[in-house]
Image (spheres, rainbow, N blue to C red):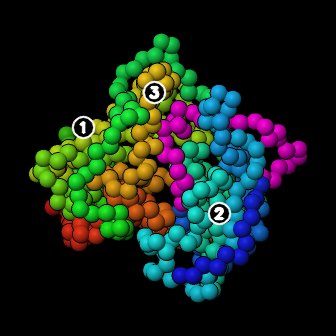
Amino acid sequence: MKVKIGSSKIVQPLYEGNPPPTTNYIPLSVFDKVTYDQHVAIIYAYSPPTTPNATIELGLKKSLAVYREWAGRLGKDSNGEPVILLNDEGVRFVEASVDRALDQTVSIGPSASLLSLHPSLEGVEELVQVQVTRFLCGSMVVGFTAHHLVADGHATSSFLVAWGQACRGLEISPLPFHDRTIFSPRDPPILDFEHRGVEYVSKNIKKVYPLIDNSVDDIVAHKVHYTAEFLSKLKARASSMNGAHDRPFSTFESLVAHLWRAITRARGLNGQENTQVKISVDGRARMKNPRVPNGYFGNLVLWAFAKAKAKDLLREPLPYAAKLLHEAVVNVQDDYFKSFIDFANHKAKEEDLVPNAVADSKESILWPNLEVDSWLRFPFYDLDFGSGGPYIFMPSFSPTEGMIFLLPSFTGDGSIDVFVPLFQQNLATFKQICYSLD
């Protein structure tokens, strides 16, 4: 697929009335500092008729006036602390074309061809980049990249919905909550949980990498579609050992438990090997006193870790894995978030610790572990520029072995698409067992 770049320019916020000063800045919160210091790219595909580029660009300018952080730059304050400079330097807007029809089975799959549908993620100072690619058949693909230090998936999806509203001439609603200084530590600090080796690690720690023969070049990304009917059966099986008064496990917990076991089997892990699943936990619904507004713009995610020996995971039935996942997520509540805030403000500086996610983001192989990125609750399909929502939405090609993405299927019937990057030699076994309820 040959993509021809027509234009590439910087787009700045468009304000109603006098523009705000461009000398202000927003300090990164403790949650921003421990997330991934990297750009994330997502892909949307739209069927014809589609919205003109000029309308998409104008809507972007208007939405940047409300979400100014994206139009700024990362920098440091006078104390050397990381901040977002609200300098309105703008985001990149690229117009491109492909001299053929969009064949969704070839072009829009988990392959390296996706990388040409959004600007490069390397050496980028803009915090957002947009590429609108037009195809001969009238279809349109929008590639969107955003820096994770600025916002998590929840906040980014709210911006994308606002961008669509602006394109359609609507008022942006709800408005984002911008204050990142609301996470005050307690005095004295109350450290109820261990955060060393979880969110923070020593600067001098030496990561132990698995002794395996495979390399990054052997990683392939596979897409699995789970129907609502299959998921219903899976949930019933995962919850079959729950007591009469226990709630059934969620679809998410049931599916991740199933994938954890299937991937562990496909990898052929040694029975004594420990394996863990890392799951993002959104603090917006969990933090109390004060409650965090749902429209909080920034990062507000910590992680839950479910751990097991490979032999136990495979020997025990599905409910065993589902229970481990459920308990891990349930433990990350308000008191955990508060303990983290206290630790980040006191011990992390005292002990000269660094965020664990910074080290993780440089890894391309998670074996024998998994990380699950769930986009099931984000309104990504609501990005409507004026001619309807997308018929495809997916992450760009990012071959990190063991980094799983869960997305709602565009069919809207409750089915789920899962993107599973594995080593080529493990893929055949995974394909054989990924739909097995045994």
Which label sits on residue 352? 3
Q: Determine which residue is flagged by label 1.
A: 245
Magenta residues, start to end: 13-41
Where is residue 428 drawn, in percent x and y?
23, 72
Q: Which image quarter is the C terminus in?
A: bottom left
**Residue drawn at point x = 51 percent, y = 13 percent:** 187
Nearer the observer: mark 3 or 1; the answer is 3
Amino acid type at circle 1 is: His
Q: Determine which residue is flagged by label 2.
A: 130
Q: Could you tell me which secondary element the residue under label 2 belongs to?
A: strand
Amino acid type at circle 3 is: Asp
Q: Is residue 23 magenta?
A: yes
Where is residue 62 drawn, in percent x and y?
76, 54
The residues tagged by marks 2 and 3 sit, at their Cα atoms, a distance apart of: 37 Å
Q: How crowded is mark 1: few (under 14 residues within 10 Å), some or many (20 or more)?
A: few
Amino acid type at circle 2 is: Val
> In this view of the protein, can residue 342 be seen by the observer?
no
